[in-house]
Amino acid sequence: MKKLILSIAVLTGFALSLNAQNSQGKTDDMGRIALAAIVPEQATGIPQEARQMLVNKMSQIATQNGLGATAANPRFCIVPLVTVISKEVTPTAPPMQAVNLDVTFYIVDAASQNIFSQTNISVKGVGQTEDKAYIQALKNINVKAGQFKGFIEKGKEKIIEYYNSQCDVVLKGAQALAGQRKYEEALFVLLSVPDVCRECFDKSMDLSIEIYKQYANYKCTEYMAGAKAAWANMNADKAAEYLGKITPDMECYADAVRLTDEITQKMLADGANVWNFKMKQYDDSIEKDKMMIQAGKEIAVAWAYWGAAPYFNWDWSWLYQQK
């Protein structure tokens, strides 16, 4: 898991001072607000290279205004709508393609299909081909323009308002996911609550511990079954592979220790001297709740990286059909 997590770009976000209800202290990156920059497939007519340019520009806008991230909860996104105002061939030698684009940026809640904030900018570009003219036009978007500050601020306020007003819905949704044994997704939902929403954040942390325990015990049953099956076939190394995944916070830990002792005694009785597997131990200097929250975060981030892509394959037709 550590190797996996190290391979994932950590979430980054912002530090925000609010009133007592929404006060925050220092937190790690998963507890902060960040926006995903997305150019949906439904945004037709945009050349592929221009799409990447748009993603880069939207990411820069978010970063310039405190909501940037290399990875983010894709529920909250910046999404563009590009409208061609005019296209023409310049009367030059050689002739060039010129485009005049109207670009509207939206901050949206992709799950509820609500638009939180929007802003509009017009840009022009000239190139040897239409695609190059598009790219040049998008290059001319000034990510430091003052209008983007208000755009991001309004979106940020709406996201905070969502968690402050809909916290019970978020918590019940996570519990429902856990009830379906979608523990990783439930942890992702809970640990994506930004810490600026202090009350909801604290409730989410408490519930994440409970759901992590459910997850841990569910996995423990799975690992013990694998270990017992491996040992039934006298495959000590395979048994150790399963037992090595069992941590002291899991209910079946004591059973795992007993099986480890049984395997050890059998191996020694048979003359083996190389099997010295030891079960993991608690570090008494670490608070168990904090350890479980951190473990839950690793699971949530891994799910977001490996498992969330199909889940967040949003249908964006609602945004583009209304325009």
Image (tube, helix red, strand yellow):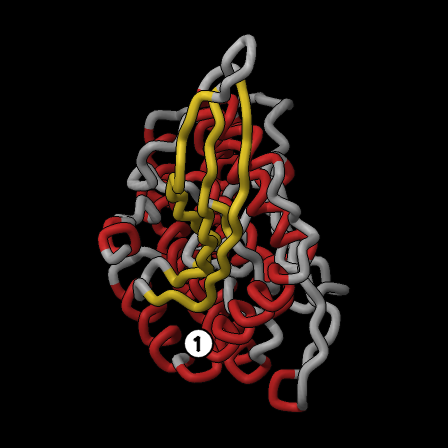
Q: Is disc 1 surrounded by few (<14), some (14 to 19) or many (20+) residues within 10 Å?
A: some
Say what amino acid the circle numbered 1 marks: Tyr
Q: Is residue 155 visible?
A: yes
Q: Residue 183: x percent and y percent?
A: 37, 57
User: In this orientation, which residue lies closer to the viewer: 214 or 230?
Assistant: 214
- For image coordinates 61% across by 62% down, the residue present is 147
Q: Secondary structure at mark 1?
A: helix
Q: Position of residue 272 (x, y in %)?
A: 58, 22
Q: Percent position (x, y) of residue 100?
A: 47, 38
96 shown above or below 153: above
Q: Nearer the viewer, residue 140 or 203?
A: 140
For disc 1, the marked residue is 162
Measured from the top left, where is residue 12 in percent x and y? 65, 53
Which quadrant of the figure has residue 189?
bottom left
Give the farthest residue toward the bottom.
Answer: 20
> Measuring 70% from the left and 52% from the top, which residue is drawn there?
144
User: Is 197 situated left or right of 312 in this image?
Assistant: right
> Which residue: 44% across, 57% down?
106
**Above or below, comparing residue 307 to residue 47 in the picture:** below
Quadrant holding the C terminus:
bottom left
Comparing 284 with 192, the one in front is 192
In the foreground, 206 or 169: 169
Task: Examine the rendering and report whether any part of residue 304 can be seen.
Answer: no
Numbered label tally: 1
> In screen coordinates, is 140 left or right of 122?
right
Q: Quadrant of the N terminus?
A: top right
| Residue drawn 34% across the image and 26% down it | 233
Check the image and report above or below for 166 versus 21: above
Looking at the image, which residue sits at the far front? 91
